[in-house]
Amino acid sequence: MYELLHNSPTGAEVVIMEDEGTVLESLVEALSAEVNVACERAETMAKYVHTLQEHEDRFDAISIDWEMYDVDVGPEALRVAKRKQPNAARIVYTKHRTDQPKAIPLGADASLAKLPGGNIPAYSSTMMQGIRLGLARRILREVRALDGDGLPALPAGRLLDEDTEILIYRRSRELARKHGLINRNGRRLIQLLKRRNWWLTFDVDSYVKLPWHGKLAGMLTYANASNQVVAKILGTTPEAVDHLIQEGCAKTDKADDLTTAAQELLAVLGFLLRISGYEPEFMTDFWRLPDTPPSLSPCPWSTVGMEAYLHNGGPHALDFCAKWIRGA
Amino acid sequence: MYSQSMYKTDPQRKLHEAEIDAGAVLYRLTSIHYCQASEILNGKAPTYSKISGRFNEPDQLTTYCANNVIVCLAEVLYHMYRAVLDRIRLKRPYADVIGAVHWKKCLSVFAVGRIAQLVYIDSEGTSRDYDSRISGATITFPDPLYEPFRDFHTRVRQERKSGILYPSARHSQGLCIALFGDMTDRLQHDFYELLPVDLRLVSEDQDPAQAPRDCDPFRDKLHATMGYYTFTAPDQFERVRNGGSIYPADIPPTGMVDFVRRRYLNYPRDAVIGQRNP
């Protein structure tokens, strides 16, 4: 769970407002390198306002230099951020320790002291937490649109604590599994969970390069199918399945038949991946559960689920199943 | 490197004899599950699907490919459209119907050695030497199955020809190629590229300038002549294009294409609309 909460989101976007050029570049470099974040630079207040206005509700976190060119711009910068980027975390980064307490009541989620020698690790860590907060706010918005209840609000003034994040992780995944295939908000939620690295993504670019037995291994993992079950489906032993998946060829008397059956199983799993909307996380349900309503008419495995149907029927059922799938 | 001159047919369309030169680039838009070099020209797709095609019976090894990327896209989009309608007719599960609107496929781009003994269908020679019913309108007959084609490919196979070159019924440029038997040995293994593609059917009111909206065939009227494609690895696509192996060379990595034959004044510019980055 610790790793899930602390893994880096994908494709995060932040704005960094900072008037000192060298500091700005060191902050951009730290975020870009360490957590692969896309940074928009704002060297002036005018550019900051323009960036936030032009890309409304786009950024995950905003880094605010309280004092720009000897003027206290922090309060105004927070106001603009709250209005134009309501979900983004607002992190104040200031060299004046006395400004830090002012920031939170004015809408900052965290404030951090700019130390003379630089405190890049602390800055990166805080911004990272800010990005997670920004994404959590977006996730909560979609969760609420799906009538998700039982989740806390995320008010300004503090970063996420672990318990809250675990709660959001569990509830949002639960709702994504329930609504992700049939509801637009559900699909939007899944896209956010993917950005947070809380949802498995089907990497088609890597997949197409695999040999067929590598593809079969991947699909069986998605479906959460055990070697014992696969052996029963293919009419062979778990050891033979192991060998087939490792080598792409069978080590039995009827090697060709086994290879053909395994390729048919790949086609069946490919069908499940497609009706799962290419979301591997849905494959287990389609593999295990009986008929997934609503349905125009039952499919051969609708009363028991595909896994049980193939397990009970062996190669004959697999052949019938593959023919049924290709029949349309 | 792609060159139009490598697909040799009689320019006067008198003779049916045709061939493909060594080094010619071919395209095949295929399943993401079966797209490796060893699988691309083995012709086994009909034996898996157990269904007849334009120039094959269920158990006849046949590979369908093309010398034009848009032909591949248009052909597959058309078959997706028909597949959705078929699934509704057959009362298939809801998820299967919905799932047929969006497919992830893979465009295999590869070069072949010389393939001789091909028959060019769009020629007087075909009409004269094989079947007088195959000429003019019938050559681009819109349905996938058509009895004169069945008789024709049966005769072509009996004569031990390598395959058939024919114009697509879904796109007015380029050529489709049906290769008979296992042609894996013709593959030039030093050039083989896999480009993943997202294909989507869209609703009639889809704005071509926008990314495709979710489309539910139980709610929306499907666009009956156009579909959407995106090459999902644009860098890879650009690399292959820059290597001179994509035709048409200036096809964008994403857009909407017709899957009916049209006359294009500016090709391929007019053949892809709504060009935008994915």
Image (spheres, coloured by chain):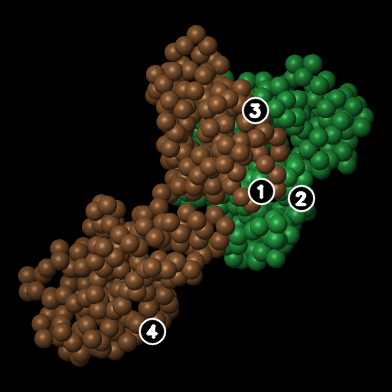
Circle 4 residue? A83
Image marks 3 and 2: residues in contact by CB distance under 8 Å: no
Which percent across, then down, holds residue A119? 12, 68
Gap in angstroms between the C-alphas marked 2 and 4: 49 Å
Chain that is coloured brown in the picture: A
User: Which residue is outermost to the right?
Assistant: B132
Q: Is residue B131 above or below residue A72?
A: above
Q: Amino acid at mark 1?
A: Ser
Q: Are marks 2 and 1 on the same chain?
A: no
Q: Quadrant of the rendered structure where residue A83 is?
A: bottom left
Chain that is coloured green in the picture: B
Give the numbered dot on residue B260: 2
Q: Is residue A86 above or below residue B197?
A: below
Which percent across, then down, holds residue B21? 63, 28
Q: Are marks 4 and 1 on the same chain?
A: yes
B108, B56: nearer the viewer: B56
Circle 1 residue? A295
